[in-house]
Image (cartoon, helix red, strand yellow):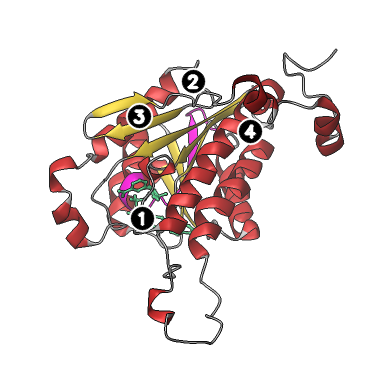
Amino acid sequence: MASTKPVALITGASSGMGAGFTRDLVQKGWNVAMVDLKASPDVQADVGDAATFYTGDVSDYDSQAKCFQAAWDTYGRLDLVCLNAGIIDRSPLYILQHRNSSDIPPAPDLKCTDVNVKGVYYGTQLAIHFMRKNVVPGGSIVVTASASSLYPHECYPEYSGSKAAVWNFVRASARVLRIKDNIRINCIRPGFVPTSLAPPGMIKAAEDIITPLETIVKALNKILDDKTLSGAALECSMDKILLTPEPEFLNGEASARASFLWEPGFVAMHGEASQLPEAAP
Ligand SMILES: NC(=O)c1ccc[n+]([C@@H]2O[C@H](COP(=O)([O-])OP(=O)(O)OC[C@H]3O[C@@H](n4cnc5c(N)ncnc54)[C@H](O)[C@@H]3O)[C@@H](O)[C@H]2O)c1
């Protein structure tokens, strides 16, 4: 039987922002399916029976799918999915220390891309599947992107690329998800938040521009409350929550039409008409 309470599945729920989302939602009367590589006894003690922990690796589709299935079997509904788990670069892609070698450098460890990008694509597909089963089909997906989706982060170029990718994925998929499946997908772009993701020295260096966890939690609640938000990216900077403007088409119609909806391509890819307003009848 479906839970009488709204249900969220949150990835990366044992620490930082995911733990903040979990605590806030439980306090508001939600049930939360917490997905992470490892459990946090502290967070679980705070949220008690209202949350269930599932061990899972979001970069592995089968592992993430098992968590979704187990959460569905427990709660029988899924209102919100926060695709939040993330890591920073594991390999120094500039290979500055490899300058004096003529050997081909070893393959980089691209786990950051697997977690931050593939983890979000996998989670979106799984959210669509389970949200279709809700009594009223549909729901809300919130991706934790980053300030660095837009402002490049030169220390961690793979991370910055991964966060740009998921922001654009949100923008590209939002209208179709809304029309086809009554799903709103949005993202949050946090500035610098002092969590376990950040090296302690960086926390010290950025202490005057810190974005508190509270701002990130407020942004999630803004997305939940404002049902007009779809495909939006909310930048969280210190105490401010700012709607990221859509970029202009630099070469007018030529830029716009280079990425236009081509309905035959949509049908070939997805097997049915897009139903988007500008699709040819
Ligand atoms: N801290 C910041 O300044 C900052 C800024 C912008 C965006 N972000 C993003 O916010 C999100 C949350 O990060 P945080 O700052 O709370 O960091 P955090 O390290 O405190 O929390 C991340 C959680 O994700 C989990 N995780 C990592 N890999 C996983 C995997 N493969 N499968 C399942 N869980 C996994 C970790 O175990 C951890 O509990 C991330 O996507 C991060 O990129 C962080």
Between disc 1 and disc 2, whose residue precedes? 1
Q: Dot 1: what SS?
A: loop
Amino acid type, residue under disc 1 in the picture: Glu
Between disc 2 and disc 3, whose residue precedes? 3
**Dots 1, 2 in contact, CB < 8 A:** no
Instruction: Return the x and y of residue 4 as percentages of the image width and height.
Output: 51, 27
| Mark 3 or mark 4, whichever is nearer to me | 3
Between disc 3 and disc 4, whose residue precedes? 4
Amino acid type, residue under disc 4 in the picture: Met
Q: Quadrant of residue 214?
A: top left
Q: Residues within 10 Å of mark 3 (few under 14, many from 20)?
A: many
Q: Quadrant of the C terminus?
A: top right
Q: Dot 3: what SS?
A: helix
**Dots 3, 4 in contact, CB < 8 A:** no
Q: Is residue 225 above or below residue 208?
A: above
Magenta part of the chain: 1-17
